[in-house]
Image: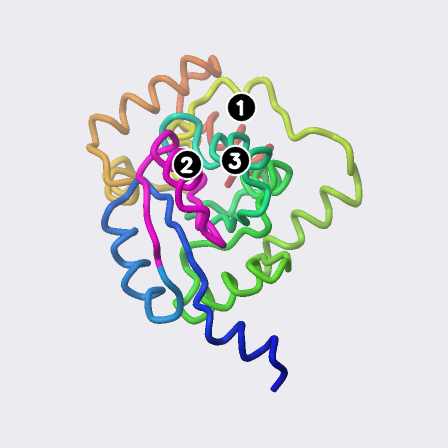
Amino acid sequence: MTDYQSEQEQRRLRVFLVDDHAMFRAGVRAELGVHVDVVGEASGVTEAITRIAALEPDVVLLDVHMPEGGGRAVLDAMRRSHPQVRFLALSVSDAAEDVIGLIRAGARGYVTKTISPDELAAAVRRVADGDAVFSPRLAGFVLDAFAARPDAPVADPELDQLTNREREVLRLLARGYAYKEIAKELFISIKTVETHVSNVLRKLQMSNRYELSRWAADRRLV
């Protein structure tokens, strides 16, 4: 064993969690805390920016869809002021648009929340070492996007009208989830789901969920 390897094993990585669901943060903290030092957490963008700047962790586990602009807003704020901090996106979403958008914004990797605790700990270590890490099927999105159009921005004027939460509701709706199931998945009320769907229909000028599903499938959001 080299001196460098010995030093790396002795120094536990400092990790910061950003996710707007308290129960999920608690679960990750409990599981990941066996392997690393979870030095802080935040439930929103503004809090995350302030606390990451103060704590300067090695790796930030970053949710994609949150109020105030989501994970993209955190990356945009931090990448110039704290380039030494590395970000690993950890999201329920496996949509190509989300994956590519976060990587273009500066995340070093992207894994979904189905990942096991041991796999997540390994992903955190690899990101801290400078590697790029992706859940298996997500790597293809990134390779295809950068190989085919390396300089093209990921932009869609119609999609850009929607908030992060509206996109999340749209994606689950397009996958065939009922309103009750969407509410349970996103920890919101059925009434809130109905409001989001109504807003999406209005913004996209559509009349029913079947049109929305077809629209989402065409953009590989499902």
Mark 1 surroundings within 10 Å by alpha-carbon count, few (fewer than 14), some (14 through 19), many (20 or more): some
Q: Which mark is residue 78?
A: 3
Tell me the kind of residue under disc 1: Leu
Query: Relative to 193, is 37 above or below?
Result: below
Label 1, label 3: how many angstroms apart (C-alpha)? 25 Å
Tell me the kind of residue under disc 2: His
Q: Which residue is drawn at 48% across and 30% down?
A: 73
Residue 162 image point, x, y percent = 46, 22
Q: Which mark is residue 65?
A: 2
Residue 171 image point, x, y percent = 44, 37
Q: Give the range drawn in magenta.
A: 38-64
Label 3, label 2: how many angstroms apart (C-alpha)? 17 Å
Query: If the image is split into quadrants, where does the N terminus sit?
Result: bottom right
Q: Residue at x 53, y 43 (%)?
A: 95
Depth order, front residue of 56/19: 56
Q: Residue at x 52, y 65 (%)?
A: 125
Label 2, label 1: how many angstroms apart (C-alpha)? 14 Å
Residue 81 image point, x, y percent = 55, 34
Determine whether the residue tagged by mark 3 lies in a helix, strand or loop: helix
Left or right, 61 with reference to 191: right
Label 1: which residue? 159
Q: Nearer the viewer, mark 1 or mark 3?
A: 3
Tell me the kind of residue under disc 3: Met
